[in-house]
Amino acid sequence: MNYDVFCSSVVGYKNKIKNKGSQDYLKYKKLENGIICAIGDGHGIDRCKYSHKGSEFACDACIDILTDLYDEIANFDEEELNNLIKNISKENYIQVSIQNRWRKYVINHFRKKVPNVYKIDYVLYGTTLIGVLITNKIKLYLQIGDGNIVEYLNEFNIVDYNKENKVNGVLNSMYLDDAYKYIDLKISFNNLEKLDSIVLFSDGFTNSFNNYDELNKSLTNTIREYRKNVFTRYNIDIQYKKYLQYLTINKSKDDISIIFIL
């Protein structure tokens, strides 16, 4: 199955005035029968010196591990898929694998700067992560931190996360020693007839709106215009970054990254 992907990202106003680059990173990978998307949002505070790399490595790790999962289930029948979904829902091996792969990328990066280091301070690379795997068989959502995923199943539906998978008073982050415990993961069979589109975005986009109604209107308008015809699609491609720049300057002040799966 083919999926159209439209994505955009801008540097937040508060980072521009500090002469800093975006701490966000987005990445997607088209598959023969699906797609994987990921957005990392580096914390950007002084303590997290390399959070712009942390967000990149989080996306890379997410794409790596979900690609492995996609390859694993390529020839699964329905019973095998059902057992896999049950096991993934009970176990943490996807989450552990993503954390371990992220740490591997972090270690390799840090050792290039400090070759003789024995202990890595993962806080330097602090980041959140959201990811999506959609195939003709399954849909999988994962999240740690404050990004959001919206799916349209005939209507606006923001994906809820397990509130128990939160550290009280702390932003959930990939730098935590037990970060895998706080990567909330949802997996189910994919009902292609009902699933219309999916949008994932960093909290810089979420915080640009007063409520979910305003957010929904923005997303549905973009989806409608993108699908209308080739001319409106071209216009969206040209104008959308300007729209995100308006949001960060006048609303959230934060980096914004967003991916539409259509």
Image (tube, rainbow, N blue to C red):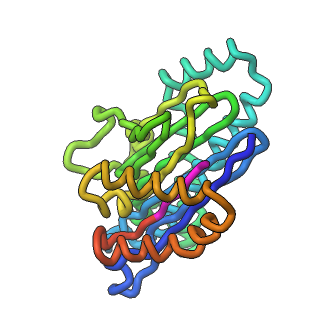
- Which x, y percent locates residue 171? 29, 52
Above or below, comparing residue 90 to residue 255 in the picture: above
> Which residue appears farthest toward the top when viewing the image?
79
Residue found 60% across the figure and 27% down from its top: 191
Above or below, comparing residue 126 to residue 198 in the picture: below
- Which x, y percent locates residue 227? 61, 54
- In this view, the residue in front, 129 or 31, is 31
Q: Is residue 32 left or right of residue 199?
A: right
- Which x, y percent locates residue 142? 48, 40
- Which x, y percent locates residue 256? 42, 66
> Which residue appears farthest toward the left when viewing the image?
169
Residue found 59% across the figure and 59% down from its top: 226
Is residue 32 located in the magenta-colored stretch of the structure?
no
Residue found 66% across the figure and 20% down from its top: 81
Q: Is residue 231 left or right of residue 204?
A: right
Location of residue 69 by image quarter: top right
Location of residue 44 by image quarter: bottom left
Above or below, comparing residue 147 to residue 49 in the picture: above
Residue found 60% across the figure and 70% down from its top: 237
Which is the main secondary structure of the residues drawn in magenta? strand
Above or below, comparing residue 140 to residue 207 in the picture: above
Image quadrant in which the N terminus is located: top right
- In this view, the residue in front, 105 or 151, is 151
Q: Is residue 198 left or right of residue 75?
A: left
Boundaries of the magenta span: 257-262
* Residue 111 in sight in this render: no
Is residue 260 located in the magenta-colored stretch of the structure?
yes
